[in-house]
């Protein structure tokens, strides 16, 4: 009975945070990738970021394919110091693409190796944090802003496009597929979760711990469940990644407890 109630609560939370088109189907969704869209150029030779996508693949937080197979992180201090001009070019291009595709203000973050995107609300920033990290692009959030990675080694058709795509994709779903009432429900849910168990995020310089899963389906299921239990998670293939943060979770008990819970609930869901 306890597991059944917990599964019902899990389903309720997922329905709150997922766009309507996924609320009845997320259990059946499979991470089949779409063909990548090619770059398009304006008359002045710059990339026309707002002309590239006619549609986006399914959200990874719903069970779709993550945008990156492995985590895309920010540049290191040494990398940036060795090529500051190139790093500024990368930052400017990512910010230009983000603003063109989302109309959100974007500029270099005060934190080296990141760009900062200003959101419409703290709830939007909190939702984007959860939706972007499962796409395997590093992200940080604070207040009404999210930070996305940048590095001098980022290439236009690869990493620069990766960052712009995940921001465009997640903002597309937030702004175009979720009504105001649902966003209010998300704010209430996030506030309730934070009061009982503040969100655990990976600490800078420490990051993630990998947990082997039996299948991609298991990894996807547990990743979603962890996110709505206020533990950030992502996956690479059949490996589930959970955050390591010695300040938020000094001995790892919160993450371990959440992981034990979702493992048990996964088994219960398969047995039902």
Image (cartoon, rainbow, N blue to C red):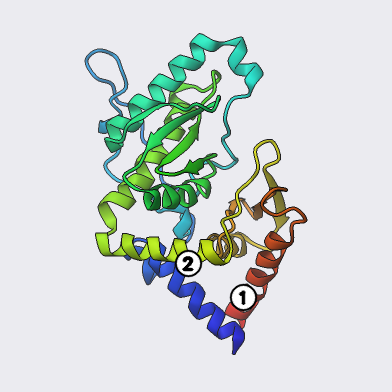
Which corner quadrant of the image does residue 101 belong to?
top left
Q: Residue at x 54, y 43 (%)?
A: 136
* Coordinates of residue 91 in the picture (x, y in percent): 44, 22
Q: Is residue 90 left or right of residue 220?
A: left
Which residue is nearer to you in this view: 22 or 262? 262
The Cα atoms of the two marked residues, 2 and 1, are separated by 21 Å
Q: Is residue 45 above or below residue 21?
A: above
> Which is more foreground, mark 2 or mark 1?
2
Q: Are marks 2 and 1 in contact (CB under 8 Å)?
A: no
For numbered disc 1, what is the local secondary structure? helix
Q: Residue at x 62, y 75 (%)?
A: 265
Q: Which mark is residue 265?
A: 1
- Counting residues from the start of the chain, the first of labels 2 and 1 encountered is 2
Q: Is residue 146 above or below residue 97?
A: below
Q: Which mark is residue 192?
A: 2
Q: Is residue 68 left or right of residue 45?
A: right
Q: Residue at x 31, y 47 (%)?
A: 172
* Coordinates of residue 198 in the picture (x, y in percent): 57, 58
Q: Is residue 132 above or below residue 51?
A: below
Q: Residue furthest left?
A: 43
* Coordinates of residue 20 in the picture (x, y in percent): 32, 65
């Amino acid at each position: 009975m306890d597991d059944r109630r917990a599964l019902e609560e899990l389903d309720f939370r997922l329905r709150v945070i997922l766009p309507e088109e996924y609320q009845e189907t997320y259990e059946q969704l499979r991470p089949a990738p779409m063909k990548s869209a090619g770059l398009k150029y304006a008359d002045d030779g710059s990339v026309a970021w707002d002309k590239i996508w006619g549609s986006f693949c399914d959200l990874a937080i719903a069970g779709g394919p993550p945008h990156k197979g492995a985590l895309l992180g920010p540049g290191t201090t040494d990398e940036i110091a060795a090529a500051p001009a190139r790093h500024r070019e990368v930052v400017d291009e990512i910010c230009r693409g983000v603003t063109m595709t989302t109309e959100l203000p974007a500029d270099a973050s005060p934190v080296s190796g990141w760009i900062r995107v200003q959101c419409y609300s703290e709830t939007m920033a909190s939702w984007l944090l959860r939706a972007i990290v499962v796409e395997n692009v590093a992200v940080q959030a604070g207040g009404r802003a999210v930070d996305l990675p940048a590095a001098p080694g980022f290439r236009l058709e690869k990493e620069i496009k990766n960052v712009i795509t995940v921001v465009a994709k997640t903002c597309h779903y937030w702004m175009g597929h979720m009504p105001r009432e649902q966003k209010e429900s998300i704010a209430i849910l996030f506030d309730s979760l934070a009061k009982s168990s503040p969100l655990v995020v990976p600490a800078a310089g420490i990051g993630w711990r990998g947990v082997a899963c039996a299948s991609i389906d298991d990894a996807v299921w547990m990743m979603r469940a962890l996110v709505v239990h206020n533990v950030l998670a992502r996956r690479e293939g059949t490996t589930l990644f959970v955050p390591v943060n010695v300040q938020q979770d000094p001995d790892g008990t919160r993450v371990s407890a959440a992981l034990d819970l979702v493992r048990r609930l996964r088994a219960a869901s398969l047995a039902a």
